[in-house]
Amino acid sequence: MAERIKKAKAELEAARQRLNQVLDAVGERTETPVYADGAAWNVRQLAIHLADADRGHNNQIKGIAEGREVIPADFDLERYNKRSVEKRAEMTLAQARESLNSTRSELNAWLDAQDEAVLDKTGRHASMKIMSIAQILDNMAEHERAHADDIARVLGI
């Protein structure tokens, strides 16, 4: 496996380990609010968001690798995030974690089949920035770490 892909996978794994460490300690506090303003999500809703973001990132990466424009120029990330969590309102924390495991397995299998050059392909990320696949992978890891840290801070984990 190419060194850059191996490094990206290791960063993603480290971020996922952090997220899992935090989620393992949540216990019965799944409905505890994490954010007071903006999306105002609780722990469970934040896990739903992360599961949806992981699926979305996978689609973006694969689309960019194929030369497709996945994110339209008028994409509204805040509206999308809010709506995606609302649509999955009944999802449990356990289901969100199952989804996270599934999408990460899919991404790892896809990365294992790629040449390192795929990491340099660029396209529009949901943030509206033009990013390389390598940058999106870095963003995925940072996104998980940041939300895991927010949960940990609120719950005193």
Image (cartoon, rainbow, N blue to C red):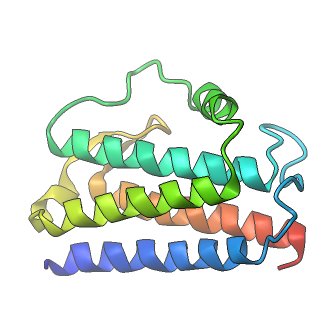
Q: Which of the pair 83/8 is nearer the observer?
A: 83
- The x and y percentages for residue 103 are 40, 56
Query: In which quadrant of the rendered view does residue 68 lie?
Result: top left
Q: Which of the pair 1/130 is nearer the observer?
A: 1
Residue 100, placed above or below residue 82: below
Q: Residue at x 24, y 39 (%)?
A: 63
Q: Residue at x 30, y 58 (%)?
A: 106
Relative to 14, 29 lies left or right: right
Instruction: Name the quarter where the C terminus is drawn.
Output: bottom right
- The x and y percentages for residue 9 are 33, 74
Relative to 13, 45 lies left or right: right
Instruction: Name the quarter where the N terminus is drawn.
Output: bottom left
Residue 91, placed above or below residue 19: above
- The x and y percentages for residue 100 are 50, 59
Q: Residue at x 43, y 46 (%)?
A: 55
Question: How many tags in the picture?
Answer: 0
Furthest residue toward top:
74
Q: Residue at x 54, y 51 (%)?
A: 51
- The x and y percentages for residue 46 are 70, 51
Residue 75, placed above or below residue 25: above
Residue 80, placed above or below residue 6: above
